[in-house]
Image: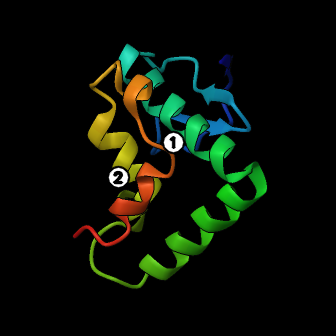
Amino acid sequence: MKIIRNKYLPLRDYAAMNLFGVLFCRPDTRLTPELINHERIHTAQFFEMGIVFFYLWYVCEWLVKLPTKGRAYYRISFEREAYLHMHDLDYLKHRRHYAWWKYLKMK
């Protein structure tokens, strides 16, 4: 995974941002193995779905969850999977395709 440190992406509230398999982070971001694993989980998600469809689904799911209680970002199925498994550094070795699907209905 290519890593680009810059002062523009991601927005200040986030540690890193994965765009098309390239990891953008701020110069002072500490890239832990868990954070990199989180972003690699996203990479697996968008390669199995197709990059355009992944981003389209991501934005649509965020918009649907935006008016509900809580922060919509943390309730997106892709983020739920990535956050729940980021500490399992072997997760991608045994992850099933479309594993994020089961996190759609999770509360």
Residue 16 or residue 11, whichever sits in front: 16
**Image quarter for residue 21?**
top right
Circle 2 Cα neighbour tier, 10 Å, few/some/many (<14 / 14–19 / ≥20): some
Q: Residue 36: x and y, percent?
A: 47, 22
Residue furthest out toward the left? 107
In this view, 65 is above or below 55: below
Q: Residue 33: x and y, percent?
A: 39, 14
Circle 1 Cα neighbour tier, 10 Å, few/some/many (<14 / 14–19 / ≥20): few
Q: Amino acid at mark 2?
A: Arg
Residue 66 or residue 29, whichever sits in front: 66
The numbered mark, 2 or 1, whose residue comes first in the sequence reads: 1
Mark 2 = which residue?
80
Mark 1 = which residue?
12
Residue furthest out toward the bottom? 67
Secondary element at tag 2? helix
**Image quarter for residue 32?**
top left
In the rendered view, does 43 fall on the left or right side of 65?
Answer: right
Nearer the observer: mark 2 or 1; the answer is 2
In the rendered view, does 73 fall on the left or right side of 44?
Answer: left
In the rendered view, does 47 fall on the left or right side of 72?
Answer: right
Secondary element at tag 1? loop
The C terminus sits in image quarter: bottom left
